[in-house]
């Protein structure tokens, strides 16, 4: 349930029913909310493998005072006859990393077959795999503080889920928690699910999926109504979206599923301009038509959290009394659709959003031919030098840039001008990318000329407030 693309039966119900009667089930008269003396905390779901952090990442996580990492430890699947743990996490030593909560999730097949899965088989596999993964994590130097079940079960199966949680509680030495679907919140059986837990993580995103590419409903649906969660009497964290959701629609505009691995700027670079909008919360939305390849004629529909929308969600999570906000998902291993850690940190520390491009240039001169041998055998150096120029462009800001354009003046048709990571635009010797995330370095070039000409290169972009900026190199 943490990841995008949840089952249609569970995920596409109207949000309007979410909070109806929420006070009637699973409540304690006094409720629960974070004490004003306790700090509001931040956590991340880590949905990649292997689990590893660079020294720079650990430094950033420490500055954020990250409370915990909720790490997908394994996935529970169903082979048609029995429960099977798959995709076990690998742990790479990362000194100084935050404490871990190990998470088990269900794949789509297991969600469909949860009803028929043997309860004892399920219990044995879940507990055994949790124990095994905890030993591996601790052997790699990580501190494990709990287990979490991220089971996307239908509401009708909450009773079976509650029985499993009671069994897992007996074996879990640390904190036991679950993630929570909004569609469970009107069910009387939710009380039994929460009873054995130390905490839970209700998620306030993807409550209602778009029905067409132009549908402008938002990914996040967190509002002040989330304060009612405390009436269940159980400590809670608020699950917040920190990833871009990409849905595919076929040529008839029927929703077909989730697309992974291509950010909105990458899609615009590949397929052209998009129809874009901004929600009242600051979340960005867009769709574009695929114009090449085997999916030509299909549509990609994007929902993208921004600095502004993430700031609003974190503030709401703080004010409703939650222990903290758990962000899905951590930008691991170059994930192009997760909100960059620099942006999360800027929001968390209440910094001003800014875009700044640093451009570095490298040049090399050499002859067209190393040597030309004369008839008398004497080697004479060539008189026609070649210049080879490359650029590295880095966004040193804390939010994603808009379009970045590089123009080259002084080059002739005979020169080689390679845009590198910057696709060519409609104008000659002009190259443009739709955006650069914080910390990203993109390469431009090489430019090769054999006449020793002086070139003027201009890198143009907009700052976070929309003001034009440029870097000029001669």
Image (cartoon, grey):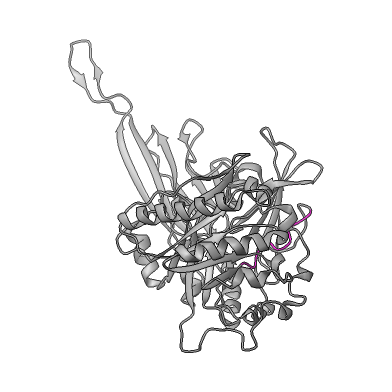
In x, y percent, where is residue 252? Answer: 82, 42
Q: Is residue 254 above or below residue 55?
A: above
**Residue ID at (64%, 57%):** 152
Residue reaching furthest front? 120
Q: Is residue 173 left or right of residue 364?
A: right
Q: Is residue 256 above or below residue 224?
A: above
Is residue 468 in sight in this rendering?
no
**Residue ID at (18%, 12%):** 377
- Using the rendered view, name the quadrant where residue 359 is placed: bottom left
Q: Is residue 189 left or right of residue 471?
A: right
Q: Which residues are magenta?
A: 203-211
Q: Nearer the viewer, residue 5 or 107?
A: 107
Is residue 323 in sight in this rendering?
yes
In x, y percent, where is residue 385? Answer: 32, 32
In x, y percent, where is residue 284? Answer: 65, 62
Residue reaching furthest top? 375
Q: Is residue 118 above or below residue 373?
A: below
In x, y percent, where is residue 57? Answer: 38, 61
**Residue ID at (34%, 56%):** 54
- Residue 46 is a magenta residue: no
- Residue 210 is a magenta residue: yes
Q: Nearer the viewer, residue 247 or 364?
A: 247
Secondary structure mostly taken by the magenta-highlighted segment of the chain: loop
Q: Nearer the viewer, residue 42 or 198?
A: 198
User: Which quarter shows the N terminus?
Assistant: bottom right
Please tell me how many numbered marks the rendered image carries: 0
Q: Is residue 261 left or right of residue 143?
A: right
């Amino acid at each position: 349930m943490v990841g995008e693309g949840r089952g249609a039966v569970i995920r596409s119900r109207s949000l309007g029913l979410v909070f109806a009667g929420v006070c009637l089930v699973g409540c304690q008269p006094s409720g629960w909310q974070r004490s004003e003396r306790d700090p509001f905390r931040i956590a991340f779901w880590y949905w990649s493998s292997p689990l590893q952090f660079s020294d720079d990442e650990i430094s950033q996580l420490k500055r954020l005072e990250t409370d915990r990492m909720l790490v997908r430890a394994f996935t529970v699947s169903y082979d048609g006859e029995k429960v099977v743990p798959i995709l076990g996490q690998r742990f790479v030593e990362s000194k100084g990393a935050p404490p871990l909560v190990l998470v088990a999730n269900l794949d789509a097949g297991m969600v469909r077959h949860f009803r028929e899965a043997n309860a004892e088989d399920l219990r044995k596999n879940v507990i055994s795999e949790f124990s095994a993964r905890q030993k591996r994590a601790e052997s790699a130097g990580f501190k494990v503080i709990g287990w979490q079940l991220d089971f996307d079960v239908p509401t009708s199966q909450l009773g079976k889920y509650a029985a499993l949680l009671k069994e897992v509680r007996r074996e879990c030495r640390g904190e036991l928690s679950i993630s929570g679907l909004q569609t469970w919140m009107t069910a009387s059986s939710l009380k039994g699910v929460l009873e054995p837990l130390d905490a839970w993580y209700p998620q306030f995103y993807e409550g209602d999926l778009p029905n067409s590419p132009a549908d402008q409903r938002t990914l996040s649906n967190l509002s002040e109504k989330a304060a009612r969660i405390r009436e269940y009497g159980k400590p809670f964290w608020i699950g917040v979206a920190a990833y871009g959701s990409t849905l595919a629609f076929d040529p008839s505009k029927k929703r077909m599923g989730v697309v992974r691995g291509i950010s909105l700027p990458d899609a615009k670079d590949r397929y052209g301009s998009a129809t874009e909008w901004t929600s009242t919360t600051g979340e960005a939305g867009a769709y574009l038509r695929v114009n090449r390849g085997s999916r030509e004629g299909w549509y990609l529909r994007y929902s993208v959290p921004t600095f502004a929308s993430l700031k609003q969600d974190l503030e709401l999570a703080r004010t409703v009394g939650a222990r903290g906000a758990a962000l899905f998902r951590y930008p691991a291993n170059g994930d192009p659709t997760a909100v960059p850690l620099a942006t999360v940190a800027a929001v968390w520390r209440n910094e001003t959003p800014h875009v700044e491009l640093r451009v570095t240039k490298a040049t090399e001169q050499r002859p067209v031919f190393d040597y030309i041998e004369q008839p008398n055998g004497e080697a004479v150096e060539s008189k026609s030098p070649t210049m080879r120029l490359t650029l590295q462009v880095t966004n040193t800001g804390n939010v994603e840039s808009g379009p970045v354009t590089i123009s080259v003046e002084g080059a002739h048709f005979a020169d080689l001008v390679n845009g590198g990571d910057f696709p060519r635009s409609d104008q000659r010797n002009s190259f443009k990318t739709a955006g650069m995330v914080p910390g990203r370095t993109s390469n431009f070039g090489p430019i090769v000329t054999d006449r020793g000409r002086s070139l003027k290169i201009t890198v143009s972009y907009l700052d976070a407030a929309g003001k034009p900026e440029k870097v000029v190199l001669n």
